[in-house]
Image (spheres, rainbow, N blue to C red):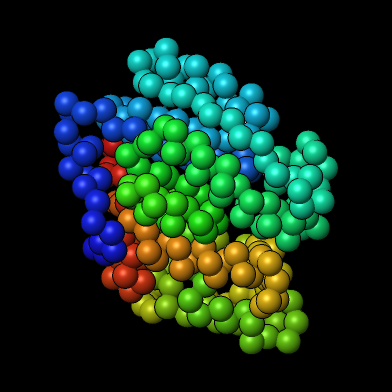
Amino acid sequence: MKQSQDHSFSRSMENESNQLRISILPAPAQGHMIPMIDIAKAFAIRGAKITIITSPAFAAIFLKQIERANQLGLEFHVQTVKFPSTEVGMPDDWENTDAVAYNQNLPKFAVALSLLRELVLHILEKRRPDCLVTYFYFAWATDIAARLKIPRLAFGDVITRHQPQKGVSCDSETFLMPHLPGDIGAFGWAFRKPIQAPKPFHPKLTRNQLPPHSRQEVGTDLSKLQREAFESEAKGFGTNFNSFYELEKDYANYYKNVLGRNVKMNKKNEH
């Protein structure tokens, strides 16, 4: 497994005499924050002290879950940070991808993510965590983690190594998705079940079936953010997925052996 940074993350988790402090920086989107809180709970169950860095609006949404975790003896803290929406021309109360028309505001949202860097760095310099776990698209997270001499784990990823969607003339034209170790459903999502298809499998998709950020033209702020995020993730300690190896071992092995990345997943019955 790739180890591009010399950190003792695993050894720290095993050392019960020292409580590991982990800062979690989720995406400002409810669909991403829910699994990241699940991951935070998995760390806390193993004795880690968790600080979730999020906007005031999201802190209010998940307050009951965090209070329940603390009642169970887990140690959760919340540090709020104002999302820089007005700085990029969005409404002051626009703090997440569910609040307004997502597609129309995606470029501004990408710029806002980059503006969080100094605000988050200031928080981390005060709290001095042992590890930073962030949303994949916080491209600057690996650099500030290196500055603090701690490992950074990315959450989630979108594989865009081949980008065959760039070679079609319209959104409805089909293209082949090469080398994925599994079947692809009608909406472009991988089925979570044993696959009998021959390997390598080459499913057909159209650009209409892809998420908006995968349809962006090269040269936009969003495409720049995406490129920087992949470069950042490749330099980090690894990537964490809210799943377990026995369920999606083909994809875990592909991520490790083909892409050369350090993937972190739970074992069966530990999720």
Closer-to-camera residue (188/118): 118
- Residue 142 horizontal side relative to residue 7, left or right: right
Residue 204: percent from left, percent from top: 58, 77
Q: Quadrant of residue 196?
A: bottom left
Q: Quadrant of residue 19?
A: top left
- Residue 17 horizontal side relative to residue 72, left or right: left
Image: 267 above or below 74: below
Closer-to-camera residue (89/26): 89
Q: Quadrant of the N terminus?
A: bottom left
Say whether residue 175 is visible: yes
Measuring 25% from the left and 45% from the top, which residue is drawn there? Answer: 9
Residue 65: percent from left, percent from top: 52, 22
Measuring 46% from the left and 24% from the top, which residue is drawn there? Answer: 77
Image: 131 above or below 112: above
Residue 232: percent from left, percent from top: 45, 63
Residue 96: percent from left, percent from top: 69, 42
Total labels drawn = 0
Q: Quadrant of residue 207?
A: bottom right
Q: Quadrant of the C terminus?
A: top left
Measuring 76% from the left and 41% from the top, which residue is drawn there? Answer: 94
Say whether residue 202 is visible: no
Image: 79 above or below 249: above
Closer-to-camera residue (175/13): 13
Image: 81 above or below 4: above
Residue that sits furthest to the top in the current view: 71
- Residue 125 horizontal side relative to residue 170, left or right: left
Measuring 29% from the left and 33% from the top, which residue is drawn there? Answer: 20
